[in-house]
Amino acid sequence: MLINPALHQQQYTMKKSTTKYNKIKKLKSNKSILKKELYASENRYRRLFESAKDGILILDAETGKIVDVNPFLIELLGFSKQNLIEKSIWEIGAFQDIYENLEKFLELKKTKYVRYDDLPLQTSSGKKIHVEFVSNVYSEGLNDVIQCNIRDITERMNTQNEIKFQADLINNVAQAVIATDLQGKVIYWNHAAEKIYGWPSSEAIEQNILDLTPTDQTKDQALEIMKNLSSGKSWAGEFLVKRKDGSSFPAFVTDTPMLGLNGNLIGVIGISSDITERKRAETELIKAKEGAEESDRLKSVFLANMSHEIRTPMNGILGFTELLRTPDLTYEEQQNYIGIIEKSSTRLLGQINDIISISQIESNQNEITLSEMNLHLQIKEIIDFLRLEAKTKNLNISFRNGMPLNETIIKTDSKKVNAVLTSLVKNAIKFTQSGSIELGFAKKDRYFEFYVKDTGPGIPDDQKNMIFERFRQGSDDLTRNFEGSGLGLSISKAYVEMLGGRIWVENNAESGLNDSGSTFFFTIPVYPPEKKNLSGTR
């Protein structure tokens, strides 16, 4: 078969043209597809950009000018799009807290990626908001752009700040705040709980509350607490609670149910306070109340007793004065009546002096007057004055002094020392039925210590302090057996303390002095007398 060269060349050229056409056609088709896909991609991006619930800001990486901004950011900031496009970011008031100057912007370009978890922005109205800010640098055609994603976290920050505020508030209250689950496992333990119970929060969390703060509560209390909490009610009461170191203290506890979303009980919140001081104050208040009531009772007894103590000698004085008017009285009868009148007058005068003295003490009108006093001579005078009274009861009264006479001259308030010694000796005579009474003193360091010892019945231990209280005579029953106002020892105590000393009583058996009786002691500080110049010159 013969081949026509011209025809073959023609066919070859036609085939080649067809292939090239098909390629061009396919290329055009591909370009069309790419164009459609690019268009679709741009539409998707634009829809995402327009509908995003976060703010999106596109910047020119070279100039920092705003290229594009999505509707959400416009609404968030309150600026129009025209106010933003083609303006540098640091020119916009909203971003002044982020980009204070160009150097920061250049730093952003260099870093390529920047994230701020909390940055402040300012809206067109001047309102401050908080945003989460993320920026990326990427290429777009021939230029680099910066895409900034801005999420409004103002509400979240406000919630977090509110939670932090409440947590700080709870952490810094004076009461212990403890939260537990239904099994008693601790899930919250504030600072006050650490101080009150001694357990740090790190050790308390996850531990059982019964192991940390064992309480002394009854079974009825425990049942009442669970009953209240189960019904959604709070419970409040007092417990004796132990600390970490084992010491106990009274606590006032309020247990409140912690409820879940469905209203079921999921735990307990306990608020407790150390009420040691309150309990102490309550106890002191009760004691003060009882003391006031006792004082009122004693004053009533005292007034009744004083009425008797004043009327008795007054009746004696008036009665025997009237008898002296009787005609034909013998000399012996007259002297007897006069003696009774003198004794009653002395007794009445003593009562009046005690009342005046105690009133002066209570009104702080009794002052200290220092003068020289010879103790030896003063005590001898007291003994001589009271010897006759002691002799009527067959009591021997004596004085023991082991100090040289020139060392017994001191500077003090002689009237008060004399009053205290006289009162103690009279008391000894009054309560001693037989035996003896002894006075003495000795110098001990910077004090003179005096004593009055008797062989009377002694003082019961529970009355050793009470007898120095006002309106007391050891026991209220004694007022029926012994005359007196019950003010003598309280006046003596006040005088001794005014002089800077103290007064107390011991039974002789305790001191090894005797098997019976008691000894009253008191001290006064030593004030040496002024030295005199015998030559008369200074």
Image (cartoon, rainbow, N blue to C red):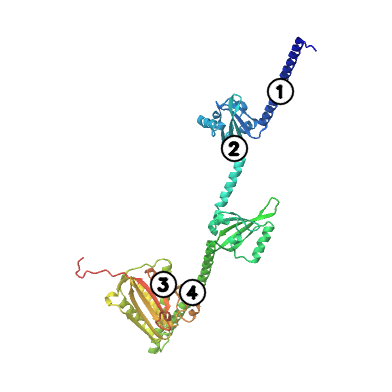
CA gap between label 2 and label 1 equals 42 Å
Of the residues shown, which amino acid type is indicated by label 1?
Asn
Q: Earlier in the sequence, mark 1 or mark 3?
A: 1
Q: Is residue 142 left or right of residue 456?
A: right
Work out which residue is located at the far right of the displayed protein and give it. Answer: 1
User: How far across and how far down the image is residue 313, in percent?
Assistant: 44, 80
Dot 2 corresponds to which residue?
132
Front position among marks 4 and 2: 2
Quarter of image, res 207: bottom right
**Disc 3 to disc 2, how far (Cα)?**
81 Å
Numbered mark located on residue 493 in the image: 3
Indicate the amino acid at tag 2: Glu
Q: Work out which quarter of the rendered image holds the C terminus and state it.
A: bottom left
Measure how far apart labels 1 and 3 are at the Cα level: 122 Å
Q: Nearer the viewer, residue 241 or 244?
A: 244
> In this picture, is 274 found above or below 388?
above
| Residue 320, above or below 221 | below
Sequence-wise, the earlier of marks 4 and 2 is 2
Distance of mark 4 from mark 2, alpha carbons? 85 Å
Horizontal arrangement in the rendering, residue 6 relative to residue 164 (left or right): right
Q: Which residue is mark 1?
A: 30
Q: Is residue 78 visible?
A: no
